[in-house]
Amino acid sequence: EVQLVESGGDLVQPGRSLRLSCAASGFLFDDYAMHWVRQSPGKGLEWVAGINFNSGSVGYADSVKGRFTISRDNAKNFLYLRMESLRPEDTAFYYCAKDEGSRWYKGYFESWGQGALVTVAS
Amino acid sequence: QSVLTQPPSVSAAPGQKVTITCSGSSSNIGKNLVSWYQQFPGTAPKLLIYDNNQRPSGIPDRFSGSKSGTSATLGITGLQTGDEADYYCGTWDTSLYIGRVFGGGTKVTVL
């Protein structure tokens, strides 16, 4: 059974940094692309970032480009999201999602974690 | 403002049918596969339909998907109270912006 468990969500001040982690199990982690998708309270889904199976290619939403960095450790079965220069509009639940394929730029989100809440406020 | 357009809400009585449309453009739905996700309040989204019209194992055949041109449609027949949730369409865009895109979501209410 696929399991994705996010951690690292917290209350942070604007301008500060935070790193989210996602522990993956139940599948061959290094065969699949992975993503972060966020949802502000009461709002819809927004794709944040994706990474290929081998970290060879990554992609970001325009809203986070230059501030967020997605990475993965295939030896440890972990996905990460480094978030810098955080803004109040970054406040959201951040979901880790498994792709159905190996490339981040196409496909669908096959499995989702339970989400980690990031609140950016002073 | 979402790249894909969905109605904010649809409703119908138990046993009836609802359809949710998802409108896009030639750079997303027009050339790429569409997926649908179901989300209950306070929980993570769940894959409902993939590759326009395929259901993952465990998804009842009351749920169906289709695509025509730059629009996709999710249908739910034999509506049940347990179907009350938010539904999102998704695909990827291959214009100047390359990335995954979602619709704004549709709240299904069972009257």
Image (cartoon, grey):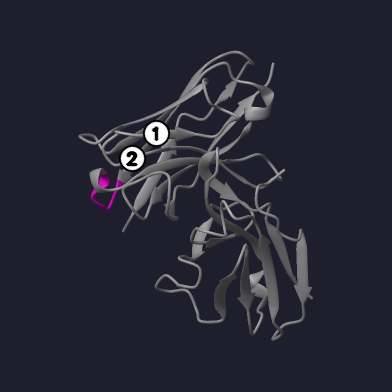
Secondary structure beneath label 2? loop
* Residue A5 belongs to the span the image colors magenta: no
Q: For label 1, count other residues whose C-alpha is less than 10 Å away and answer few (under 14), some (14-19) or many (20+).
A: many
Residue located 76% across and 58% down the image = B8
B63 is higher (above) or lower (below) than A32? below
- Circle number at residue B89: none
The image quadrant where one finds the C terminus of chain A is top right
Where is residue B85, by image quadrant? bottom right
Q: Are marks 2 and 1 on the same chain?
A: yes
The stretch in magenta equals: A25-29
Q: Point out residue A45 in the picture as x, y percentages from the top left corner.
A: 61, 47
Which is more toward the observer, A1 or A33? Answer: A33
Given the image, on which type of amino acid does mark 1 rest? Val
Q: Point out residue A12 in the picture as x, y percentages from the top left corner.
A: 59, 19
- Circle number at residue A52: 2
B22 is higher (above) or lower (below) than A79? below
Q: Point out residue B40 in the picture as x, y percentages from the top left corner.
A: 61, 59
B57 is higher (above) or lower (below) than A54? below
N-terminal-most mark, 2 or 1: 2
- In the picture of the structure, the residue carrying the numbered disc 1 is A58
Label 2 close to label 1 by CB (< 8 Å): yes
Q: Point out residue A4 in the picture as x, y percentages from the top left corner.
A: 38, 46
Residue located 30% across and 33% down the image = A55
